[in-house]
Amino acid sequence: MKGSKRRRRRLALGFGLAQLIAALVLAGPSAVSAGTTVNLDQWATLDDAWQNGNLNGNNSRYPEGGIVPFRLALEGLSPGAHEIRLEYDFTAGGHKAYDFLATWNATNAGGAICLPSGGAISSMCPSLPSPSTYPFPTDYFVTDGLSVLSAQFYAGMSRRLTLWGGSIASISAPVHSGSASGNSSVEIRVSFTTTGNAVLLAWGGHLAQSSFWDTQAGGAADGASLVSGAPWHVRTRGLDGSGAKNQDRSIQPSAIVGELPPGGPGVPTFPPVLPPALPPAPPPLQGLTPPNTSIEAPGAVAEPLSISTVVLGTVIGLSFALALTRPTRRRR
């Protein structure tokens, strides 16, 4: 009897352990704890700083073809496997907005990943560990006779996701949703593992270029500068399946100025800077008479003497001289 009871206890214990292991395996990424924080920043070019809010013409100038940098700070994670979804608006009001993701510092914010501005300041800063990078998958989506793949080749930008504090395991293929003739978005899933409690991710959103969309297919220009009214967005969703840790940042059409040439990165386009105005002339000093700089008219010029006048004057002069030199007679 005692032996059978022991066997039943062992079987029950083994069954319980098996259920626990199965639950852990099926759970996949670690669950998000209440202490986990998620914070998303984007780069404001005029402020030269990270912005925890939205971009507009007051704090940023971006050309079509430029890369808007993003950084995402995750804190309070448990070491192990995790997953997060990145989403960006492909079209806004029927115009191309962010057409693909790229390397975070391709055109802006180079080296400033730990700049203490905004809200996504990682606890690992300023001494970040070596980063892990992973290429963004190719997007074969076609609209208006052109593919996103062609837009990627046209732009010539580096396209990698960067992570500090762990390693990137995989990035899913882009999934488009919504109508490209209205409002549509793209989502990718990023799987990664952490070595500690903090992770910092960085990527960039490429602003669609009018010289490609849709002009390369013979259509009208349809880049990000054509978006009017409402802004377009980048979002982070579903960290480890949680719906309570989402972030959303937008950019207004007023922040878009000019366009980069195809085939490589460049610097943002800024309005021309006018030269400073000349200072006003100083007032004249009191009590001093300014010099007379006017030119006076010349006086009357004497007319030349005639020949007869000269001869007559000569005769009179000689006669007067002879009269003075004539000898006088002595009286006797």
Image (cartoon, rainbow, N blue to C red):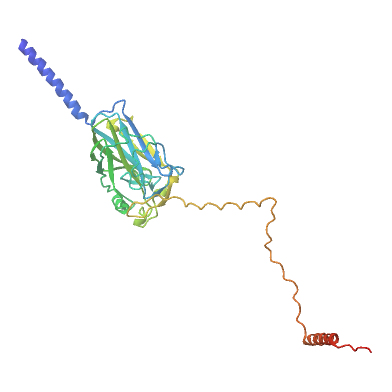
In this rendering, position of residue 175 left or right of residue 96: left
Whole-percent x and y of residue 298? 72, 71
- The image shows a total of numbered marks equal to 0
Whole-percent x and y of residue 184? 35, 43
> Vertical placement of 227 versus 12: above or below?
below
Which corner quadrant holds the C terminus? bottom right
Please report the residue visible at 31 percent of the width from the left and 42 percent of the height from the top: 203
For this orientation, the residue located farthest to the front is: 332
Whole-percent x and y of residue 329? 90, 89
Please report the residue visible at 39 percent of the width from the left and 52 percent of the height from the top: 259
Which quarter of the picture shows residue 178?
top left
Which quarter of the picture shows residue 220?
bottom left
In this rendering, position of residue 276 left or right of residue 189: right
In front of the other: 117 or 59: 117
Whole-percent x and y of residue 3? 5, 12
Which corner quadrant holds the N terminus? top left
Which quarter of the picture shows residue 80?
top left
For this orientation, the residue located farthest to the right is: 332
